[in-house]
Amino acid sequence: MGRRVMAVLAAMVVGMIGVAAVLFYASGADARAVADQRPQTVYVAQELVPSGITAADAVAKGLMVPTKIAAKGVPAGALTTVDAATGRLVALSDIAAGSFVVASRFGTTPTGSKAIQVPDGQVAVSVLLPDPARVGTFVTPGSRIVIYDTYNKDLPPAGLKTQVLLDDVLVIAVGQTSLTPTASPTASPNGQSQASAGALLTVALAPDSAAKLVQAIQTGILYAGLNGAGTKANLGQVITGANLFTK
């Protein structure tokens, strides 16, 4: 009789332990479920966040905005706060609109950053021009220029011709870089090679116009003029040695 009582009591204890374990697990599962659903704040790119912009400026301009999502949906390393420390960091590369902003996308030095913003639908092309051919130092980012091309046309009548290649071209960057050609150095009057200093003008063009400029860079001699307000170049005018001094 005593053994049966002890067996029953033992079974009851084991059962109570099992029930407690189940309740404890269920309680933990509920807590985990609640934790997974608890909203957390992360930053999402509302628009394109360009490389080089600080996190603080991106927030101030509305390029990335704080958004609450369920904790289980937060990507690893998501940027959750922009404070005095993180606000000074810059985007290391472009962050596409609609994507979660990961903290590792920001740092102290942009890598592969673009120093210029190319207008949508256009192409940036750089051309090296000496000082006289780029109006000295008066062409600056934002200037509108006309680009002339002097070329040797194979079709008769042969000879050098100068014509407007592109009109009303937007300059988006001016690089102050001196280059010394090595393949085909500039010859001085005494026959000795001399360095040719110049600067890169970077312009924004429609794709078809960009192709024209690239071809002209390879085959002709380019010269730029700074447009005044309301200036309209004569695109059909062709200047040759034969009509240079005619009115």
Image: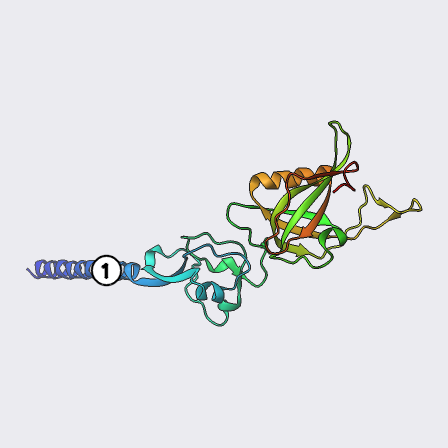
In the rendered image, the quadrant that contains the C terminus is: top right
Helix, strand or loop at mark 1? helix
Question: What residue appears at the point 69 percent right and 47 percent down from the top-left corner?
Answer: 127
Question: What residue appears at the point 69 percent right and 59 percent down from the top-left corner?
Answer: 138
Q: Say how the picture is coloured.
A: rainbow
Please tell me how many numbered marks the rendered image carries.
Answer: 1
In the rendered image, the quadrant that contains the N terminus is: bottom left
Judge from the rendering whether residue 232 lies leftward or rightward of residue 50; answer left or right: right
Question: What residue appears at the point 76 percent right and 53 percent down from the top-left corner?
Answer: 132
Q: Nearer the viewer, residue 190 or 151?
A: 151
Residue 185 sits above or below residue 198 on the image = above
Where residue 20 sits in the image (x, y, percent)? Answer: 19, 62
Judge from the rendering whether residue 181 lies leftward or rightward of residue 25; answer left or right: right
Classed neighbour count for the residue bearing mark 1: other residues with Cα under 10 Å, few (<14), some (14–19), many (≥20): few
Where residue 239 sits in the image (x, y, percent)? Answer: 73, 39
The answer to which quarter of the image holds residue 136 is bottom right
Where residue 224 sits in the image (x, y, percent)? Answer: 69, 49
Where residue 30 sits in the image (x, y, percent)? Answer: 23, 60
Name the kind of residue labelled 1 in the image.
Asp
Q: Nearer the viewer, residue 172 or 18?
A: 172
The answer to which quarter of the image holds residue 44 is bottom left
Question: What residue appears at the point 8 percent right and 58 percent down from the top-left corner?
Answer: 4
Q: Residue furthest bottom?
A: 84
Q: Which residue is mark 1?
A: 30
Residue 238 sits above or below residue 60 on the image = above
Q: Residue furthest front?
A: 247
